[in-house]
């Protein structure tokens, strides 16, 4: 099994290699097999990427928005036409099951390209009357943007950052996670095939040092990161030194609150989607599941039944519902949290082991009950298929406990009482919330967090604010009046 790319990088409209960089082995998580070898970007590669981006952006900014839109729309159509090929590559890159990647990865990336293609021609300024004189405003691109991706949704994240940047007249240099470097290369290839001028979307590979070199370059105006809080703090500090625009989509320890009047089947389904989809490797996951005591045992019983029926196995088999974790390091980290949960007195309801799959980085979907707020598994982001179920008595109590975290990415509420649902969501300190649903993230809706979970918003019309700036023009219509 091989997924060898044409070359490690895509710069100035073509694949580019420099084997002098440190090797990056791409490991298929289902078997542990090395399926590709790439090389980190050398200073020469980084320079070529930034130089071509700065050059191309100047001309791209002058193109009518509708022309930019046509190219992005063509790329969206091409991604949908090649969904099978792109989904199989995503599965090899991440280990996520094909059942999932076929509907959630390249397709959502195409949605972003299509959405921002439609939005681009509608972005306008305004006229401000001042009597005789007036002011008009212009929306201008920022310039060269740097995108830094995470390993859980490589294609989607590249599109969530690249689509608004390009639609609004910017260039982007994108650095994928070194764990999942393959998918962004295919996106760059498709964009150029769709007509995007060379240099506007470059992909360079590497670890933190490459990212640091990109975001500290004086030609860069904007940095958009999806990653951990620890990485976010470092990137934010480097960007701040140059007063660069930033968007940070970071981690979470999000609450999912289930009241005793909720539909239990729906609530169980929501909790499973919010903990086990992508083997739990989703930043917005509702990993603190607060269940009102009146339905606790009924909820746990049904949750255990449905969890134990999840089919694990070969991610390339479309019948497989859950694949491995992305890497051996991530597996070991998550197993450490499972041990910590048991040591601190949480009750293991189901899972916790490696399962029957003989190879790869698999972990059974795991549920802990009787979890208390001070336990490690209730405080720290695990990023694996480990659900912590906590009890609560009433609304006031659960809202206070749900907010008692340094994170604030997401939150969810299941209840038949819609007045209570809206009241609780209004009180929760989270940027993205759901009522009687969980983890749905259409491109039409803003996505992002508060507190340590991030800065700014991705997707929707909100992205316009983060990939453009306003120029104000005062127009004097009469003689200049001066006191001297």
Image (tube, grey):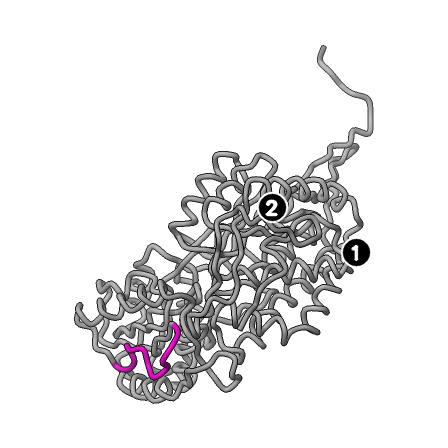
Q: Position of residue 356 (x, y in %)?
A: 34, 84
Of the numbered discs in the image, which one, if any, rests on residue 145? 2
Magenta stretch?
349-360
Q: What residue do we see at 52% from left, 71% from top?
A: 92
Mark 2: secondary structure:
strand
Q: Which SS does the magenta portion mostly show?
A: loop
441, 433: nearer the viewer? 441
Which disc number belongs to residue 124?
none
Outermost residue toward the top in this view: 484
Within 10 angstroms of label 2, few (less than 14), some, or many (20 or more) residues? Answer: many
Q: Residue at x 54, y 52 (%)?
A: 205
- Of callouts 1 and 2, which one flags the residue occurring earlier in the amino acid sequence? 1
Which residue is located at x 38 percent, y 88 percent? 309
Residue 55 in sight here: yes
Q: Tag 1, which secondary structure?
A: helix
Left or right position of 260 against 231: left
Residue 162 place in picture, x, y as percent? 62, 55
Can you give x and y, in whole percent of width and height, for residue 59 in the image? Answer: 77, 43
Q: Toward the viewer: 262 or 417?
A: 262
Specify the quadrant of the image occupied by residue 480: top right
Q: Residues within 10 Å of mark 1 (few under 14, many from 20)?
A: some
The C terminus: image quadrant: top right
Query: Do the residues bearing badges 1 and 2 touch, measured as CB atoms within 8 Å?
Result: no
The residue identified by callout 1 is 66
Extreme residue toward the right, this view: 478
Q: Locate residue 264, reporting x and y percent.
A: 38, 85
The residue lying toward the viewer, choosing from 133 and 438, is 438
In magenta segment, residue 473: no
Q: Quadrant of residue 282?
A: bottom left
């Amino acid at each position: 099994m091989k997924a060898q790319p044409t070359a490690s990088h895509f710069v100035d409209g073509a694949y580019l290699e420099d084997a002098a960089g440190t090797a990056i082995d791409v490991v298929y998580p289902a078997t542990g097999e090395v399926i590709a070898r790439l090389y980190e970007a050398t200073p020469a590669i980084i320079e070529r990427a930034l130089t071509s981006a700065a050059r191309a952006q100047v001309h791209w900014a002058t193109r009518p928005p509708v022309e930019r839109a046509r190219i992005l729309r063509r790329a969206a159509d091409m991604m949908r036409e090649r969904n099978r090929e792109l989904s199989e590559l995503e599965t090899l890159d991440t280990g996520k099951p094909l059942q999932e990647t076929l509907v959630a990865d390249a397709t959502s990336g195409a949605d972003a390209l299509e959405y921002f293609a439609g939005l681009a021609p509608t972005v306008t300024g305004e006229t401000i009357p001042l009597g005789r004189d007036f002011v008009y405003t212009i929306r201008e691109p920022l310039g060269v943007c740097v995108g830094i991706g995470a390993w859980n949704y490589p294609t989607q994240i590249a599109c969530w950052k690249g689509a608004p940047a390009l639609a609004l007249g910017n260039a982007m240099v994108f650095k994928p996670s070194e764990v999942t470097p393959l998918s962004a290369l295919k996106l760059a290839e498709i964009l150029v095939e769709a007509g995007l001028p060379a240099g506007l979307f470059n992909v360079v590979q590497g670890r933190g040092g490459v990212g640091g070199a990109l975001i500290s370059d004086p030609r860069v105006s904007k940095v958009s990161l999806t990653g951990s809080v620890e990485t976010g703090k470092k990137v934010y500090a480097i960007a701040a030194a140059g007063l660069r625009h930033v968007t940070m989509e970071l981690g979470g320890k999000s609450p999912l609150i289930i009241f005793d009047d909720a539909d239990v089947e729906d609530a169980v389904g929501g909790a499973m989607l919010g903990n086990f989809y992508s083997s739990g490797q989703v930043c917005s996951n509702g990993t603190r599941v607060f269940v009102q005591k009146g339905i606790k045992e009924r909820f746990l019983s049904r949750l255990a039944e449905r969890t134990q029926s999840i089919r694990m196995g070969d991610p390339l088999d479309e019948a497989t519902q859950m694949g491995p974790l992305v890497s051996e390091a991530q597996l070991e980290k998550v197993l450490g949290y499972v041990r910590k949960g048991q040591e601190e007195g949480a009750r293991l309801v189901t899972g916790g082991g490696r399962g029957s799959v003989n190879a790869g980085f698999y972990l059974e979907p795991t549920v802990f009950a009787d979890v208390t707020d001070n336990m490690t598994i209730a405080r720290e982001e695990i990023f694996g298929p480990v659900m912590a179920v906590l009890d609560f008595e009433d609304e006031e109590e659960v809202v206070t406990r749900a907010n008692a975290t340094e994170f604030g990415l997401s939150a969810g509420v299941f209840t038949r009482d819609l007045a209570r649902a809206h009241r609780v969501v209004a009180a929760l300190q989270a940027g993205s919330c759901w009522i009687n649903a969980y983890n749905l993230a259409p491109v039409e809706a803003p996505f992002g967090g508060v507190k340590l979970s991030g800065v700014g918003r991705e997707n929707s019309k909100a992205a316009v604010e983060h990939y453009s700036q306003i120029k104000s023009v005062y127009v004097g219509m009469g003689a200049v009046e001066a006191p001297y």
